[in-house]
């Protein structure tokens, strides 16, 4: 009987891990998406779309389908599903890891101001009007209605109406990965004075941080939300090794 693995996704890391496991006969992998984006690029492997109904719903799903391992490979800022995953792993006793990139660290030339959340990021922009690249997706843009004086350039995967409380906001849509050449050109063309970013730690969105460094643009860097403690793996290789070990142990009846 193959070894069922539920991978909570919505990131390129989750997709790549699922693809790496898709043809491995030891495992039966299901990749789960929240279904937040209309333009979801569906993978050619077993997947599902939509919430589970909270931590209890996820626990029930894991039990009902007989899963043997749970991997939380969601975005570092998807705090609710990560909390639910930690709860469900505990409730079901399933082996559980979080696959997450280490946060970016400032290097020489970076002009970072680290803040704990979006409300603090809005305050950190200051009182006088600036040209701000708000590269945080669409979910938490409302926090910046507390600082409506700025010219905001918003970037998201899909179109959305900027909040009425941000009269000087414009939206561009784009899906990463982004290149350094393009990010630098964007910051220059838009005469960006401040960049707001989540500390995602992902290589596919790091070019904007490099571009800001090259141009001397200050970055308001939002730190990650607190999550319940859980074992963390930073690479696909580590996740594959973890699963192989679990599988071997299950054969030996450990
Ligand atoms: P969230 O606030 O942590 O989760 C909200 C709810 O969405 C969860 O309680 C769960 O619903 C459902 N959900 C989230 N991820 C799911 C998944 N992979 N499979 C099934 N249900 C899921 O999440 P979010 O910040 O809105 O992010 C939504 C998705 O976008 C995640 O998959 C995340 O990896 C991806 N993403 C997020 C960000 C970000 O900055 N937040 C950036 C890039 C990608 P139920 O409680 O009903 O189960």
Image (cartoon, rainbow, N blue to C red):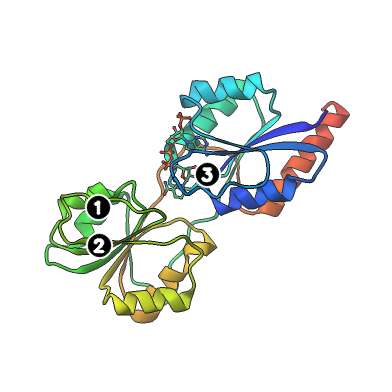
Q: Is residue 108 left or right of residue 100?
A: left
> Residue 39, position in %: x, y?
47, 49
Residue at (50, 20) in percent of width and height: 56
Q: Is residue 112 visible?
A: yes
Q: Nearer the viewer, residue 116 or 49?
A: 49
> Residue 208, position in %: x, y?
41, 69
* Mark 3 to mark 2 CA distance (whole Å): 28 Å
Residue 170: image tag: 2
Q: Nearer the viewer, residue 197 or 10?
A: 10
* Mark 2 to mark 1 CA distance (whole Å): 7 Å
Q: Which residue is mark 1?
A: 162
Crowding at dot 3, Cα within 10 Å, few <14 / some 14-19 / many 20+, comes out as many
Q: Secondary structure at mark 3?
A: loop
Ligand 1 lies under 8 Å from the Cβ of mark 2: no
Q: Which residue is mark 3?
A: 74
Residue at (56, 22) in percent of width and height: 59
> Residue 227, position in %: x, y?
46, 39
> Mark 1 or 3 closer to N-term?
3
Task: Reply above or below: 221 against 224.
Answer: below
Task: Reply above or below: 14 against 175.
Answer: above
> Quarter-wise, where is residue 216 in the image?
bottom left
Residue at (26, 51) in percent of width and height: 161
């Amino acid at each position: 009987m193959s070894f069922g693995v539920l991978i909570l996704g919505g990131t390129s890391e989750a997709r790549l891990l699922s693809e790496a496991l898709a043809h491995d006969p030891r495992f039966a992998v299901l990749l789960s998406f929240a279904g937040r984006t209309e333009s979801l690029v569906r993978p050619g492997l077993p997947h599902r779309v939509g919430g589970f109904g909270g931590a209890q719903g996820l626990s029930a799903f894991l039990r009902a389908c007989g899963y043997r391992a749970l991997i939380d490979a969601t975005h570092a800022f998807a705090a609710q599903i990560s909390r639910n995953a930690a709860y469900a792993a505990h409730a079901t006793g399933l082996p559980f890891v979080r696959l997450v990139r280490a946060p970016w660290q400032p290097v020489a030339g970076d002009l970072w101001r680290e803040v704990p959340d979006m409300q603090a990021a809005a305050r950190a922009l200051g009182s006088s009007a600036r040209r701000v690249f708000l590269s945080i997706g669409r979910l938490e843009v409302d926090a910046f209605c507390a600082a409506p004086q700025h010219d905001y350039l918003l970037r998201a995967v899909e179109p959305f109406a900027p909040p009425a409380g941000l009269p000087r906001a414009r939206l561009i849509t784009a899906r990463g990965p982004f290149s350094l050449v393009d990010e630098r050109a964007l910051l220059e063309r838009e005469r960006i004075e401040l960049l707001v970013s989540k500390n995602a730690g992902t290589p596919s969105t790091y070019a904007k941080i490099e571009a800001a460094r090259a141009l001397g643009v200050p970055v308001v860097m939002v730190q990650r939300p607190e999550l319940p403690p859980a074992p963390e793996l930073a690479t696909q290789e580590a996740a594959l090794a973890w699963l192989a070990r679990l599988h071997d142990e299950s054969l030996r009846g450990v």
